[in-house]
Amino acid sequence: MTRGKILFIKDNGEISCTTEFNGDMYPSGNGGEVLERFEEGYFSDFIKFKRFVENFNRRNYGYEEELIQNLYPSDHIINIRDNFTDYLYIINETKEQWTIVDKDENSSTLPKHSLAVVYFKEVERIIHRTPQQNKNNEQRKLSKEEFCSILERLKEAKDLVDKVDDLFNKSRENIENDFVNGASLQISHESTVVKLLKFIMNDQDDLIGYFIYELDYGRKYEAGMIQDENGKDIDISSSEKVYDYICKQGDVT
């Protein structure tokens, strides 16, 4: 099992370090989500980092423990000589340069707006990003009617698949053909559509996926299931409310 942690350097010099996520934390696995969000410029402050970690954990691990703790390094130096996890993802979105010291006392510079991928006790690579505003949001915008219509059609397709599955399961004549299922008849390409919706709406927090897969299109929603950084309920019980919340966050303007 490939383990990993995510570190976020704060402007005050503290470092927020996640719990160790156990499984698929290599860059081409779940760690790729960290790289993708970094390159999109998502980690602009600690609140967004915390929100990402909570959603990342919910999607991939489901840990109930405290997810983030603070570290207090000195002199802008991160020492990885005593690191025992497989991968570290160190995010520096501050205005200061940091230094990473590896097992052989070699130093690697971590400039502002960069991310270091550490494998065990060595720096594997450093990714640089030029900060820029997303200028394509307005061009990618969907109306609320279009957004809700797409989700409604996905829900209808899912319900149809469930009914077809149920029909096959109850049919004695098809007992020997139990490999036949409704999913083979589904042509909506749900996962692809969801990815496109997330891109179009710039859904950084994966609320759309949460609404569809975990809340069954809002039918399993209960108050208190999802909250913002202030502990206030986020009501995503319907596609309209999902749209409104994403827009309110400024992800779509």
Image (cartoon, rainbow, N blue to C red):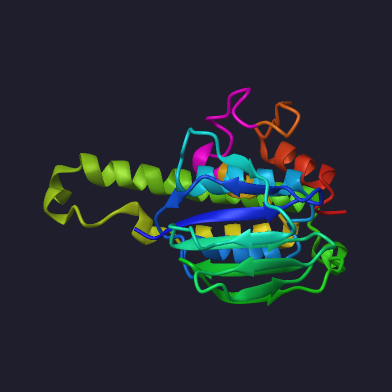
**93 or 163, which is in the foreground?**
93
Residue 80: percent from left, percent from top? 54, 62
At 80% from the left edge and 53% from the top edge, which residue is drawn? 251
Q: Quadrant of residue 35?
A: bottom right
Foreground of the two, 118 or 182:
118
**Magenta span:** 211-226
Q: Is residue 53 magenta?
A: no
Which quadrant, please, contains the N terminus? bottom left
175 left or right, relative to 85: left
**Front-most of residues 47 and 217:** 47
Q: Main secondary structure of the magenta part?
A: loop
Name the residue located 59 percent from the left edge and 50 percent from the top edge. Answer: 153
Residue 56, percent from left and from top: 56, 49
Q: Is residue 155 above or below residue 28?
A: above
Q: Residue at x 63, y 50 (%)?
A: 206
Q: Is residue 196 visible?
A: no
- Percent x, y of residue 102: 55, 69
Numbered-mark total = 0
Asked if residue 220 lies in the magenta stretch, the reply is yes
Up the image or down, 10 lies above or below 38; here it is above
Say whether residue 70 is visible: yes
In the picture, the quarter occupied by the C terminus is: bottom right
Residue lying at the far left of the rendered structure: 176
Q: Is residue 140 left or right of residue 196?
A: right
Residue 76 x, y percent position in the rendering = 74, 59
Residue at 68% across / 41% down in the picture? 239
- Above or below, 253 against 98 in this view is above
